[in-house]
Image: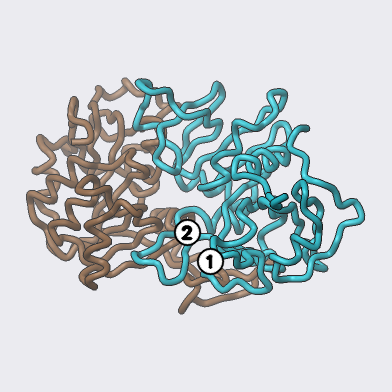
Amino acid sequence: MAKQGLTREQIAQRAAQELPDGAYVNLGWGIPNLVAPYIPAERTVYFHSENGILGMGPRAQPGEEDYDLVDAMKVPVTLLPGGVFFSQADAHVMTRGGHLDVSILGGLQVSEKGDLANWKVPGTKGSGGIGGAMDIAVGARRLIVTMEHTTKNGAPKIVKTCTYPITALECVHTIITDLAVIEVQPGGLVLLEVAPGLTPADVQKVTEPVLILSEKIREIQLAL
Amino acid sequence: MKEKIFPSVDAAVADVPDGASILFGGFGGAGFPNNLIQALARKGTRNITAITNNCGTGEGELGLLFKNRQIRRVVASFPGPQSHYFQERFAAGEVELELVPQGVLCERMRAYGAGIYAFYTPVGVGTEVAAGKEERVIGGKRCLLEYALGADYAFIKAHRADRIGNLVYRKAARNFNPIMVTAAETTIVEVDEIVPVGALDPEHIVTPSIFVDRIVEIRGVRYG
């Protein structure tokens, strides 16, 4: 039987479990943007958007779009009761100032020290763009990175030292991939969970730094 | 009383000279002073330094000014993949770009408006944007020295103004606008509607009139 990891949706589903009731959360582009629908109904989570929204709701229904109410990806969204608008400076008071409880960002590479590279692939055409990523990563009280475990060519994205342009140093707390859940600790990367059907050795094979096996290592569970 | 209301967007930008530096509000398609931008395109001011989050969507927003080769230098956080005219000019070496993390961009303008000449921030440490910047450890944290950023003009989009220039914004179209109004020698605002003095609730005014020099009503014209 072919060994399979989680789908992108399933990575998002696993990441949603990390958001406690009452948390203020910023979700980045890519897999993080898939997280919101998987939050258990009994939990209230307040979504922050860098363009000055707190209490952001789901995407607007067709025909109900208001182009003055968009998320960081320019998609028309909604505002939940209790939601609020403020300036971009105040939005980054919340990110950089450590006021958000959890931020979830996509990643191109994460180093064993928790350095994150996620804003530019070397050699790509165009100017590149940073947006709010550096402010969010530096200020995150808890930063979760969701990404595929390897590149399309099978190269590890969890590396000893990032070779892609850095977003922020020593900022990542948890990495959730299609293959594993890994925690960044002072002593190194701790393997907490492994995707169904895979062994820790399978994960180690596609991870550059040596992983420390948690005493409580277990299979990733999607249903709570 | 000095009149702040201008009869047209063209009259409001009539004195913007070649070589001017201009702050442009807007993010994700919302809150761009599109009518002022189009007036500036008609006027044909050249050699502009533009400070903005993004660099246009096709011909929209700042796209027109790049298409017309009116902008020579940009300070931006996320030029954007759809900023085709900017990307073309940038690739050809016709436009210079300073890429700034989004929250740092906000704070540099906020500092300028507040009479603060520079500040230290951990955002950008260990990244490409740290090149050439003074680094210092403050409170145990590596920080970069960032300088205040202001301009000759600010081009602003607000929802309503009263006749003396108090402003309220609409939803996420607020974004950079209330920061930029404080950081320019001359602030020019296009609004959907001008209302009598006293019509705006003083508890709800976002930008006090002291920051506003010129107001133009563009009632009925949106995303022109």
Badge number at residue B193: none
Quadrant of res B46: bottom left
Q: Nearer the viewer, mark 1 or mark 2?
A: 1
In this figure, which residue is indicated by the disc labeled 2? B104
Chain A tint as drawn: cyan
Tell which subunit mark 1 falls on: B
Viewer-closest of B208 and B26:
B26
The residue located at (13%, 50%) in the rendering is: B40
Measured as percent of width and height from the top left, residue A211 is found at: 79, 65
Q: Secondary structure at mark 2?
A: helix
Measured as percent of width and height from the top left, residue A170 is found at: 67, 65
Labels 1 and 2: the sequence-earlier one: 2
Horizontal placement of B20 versus A68: left or right?
Answer: left
Q: Secondary structure at mark 1?
A: loop
The residue located at (53%, 59%) in the rendering is: A134
Chain B tint as drawn: brown
Q: Amino acid at mark 2?
A: Val
User: Disc 1, disc 2: CB below 8 Å?
Assistant: yes
Q: How many other residues sit within 10 Å of disc 2, few (<14), some (14-19) or many (≥20)? A: many
Q: Amino acid at mark 1?
A: Gly
In this figure, which residue is indicated by the disc labeled 1? B124
Tell which subunit mark 2 falls on: B
Horizontal placement of B109 versus A83: left or right?
Answer: left
Residue B144 to residue B79: above or below: below
Viewer-closest of B133 and A19:
A19
Q: Quadrant of the N terminus of chain B?
A: top left
Outermost residue toward the right? A215
Q: How many other residues sit within 10 Å of disc 1, few (<14), some (14-19) or many (≥20)? A: many
Q: Taking the image as drawn, is residue B25 in sight? A: yes
Q: Quadrant of the C terminus of chain B?
A: top left
Measured as percent of width and height from the top left, residue A101 is found at: 68, 43
Horizontal placement of A61 versus A2: left or right?
Answer: left
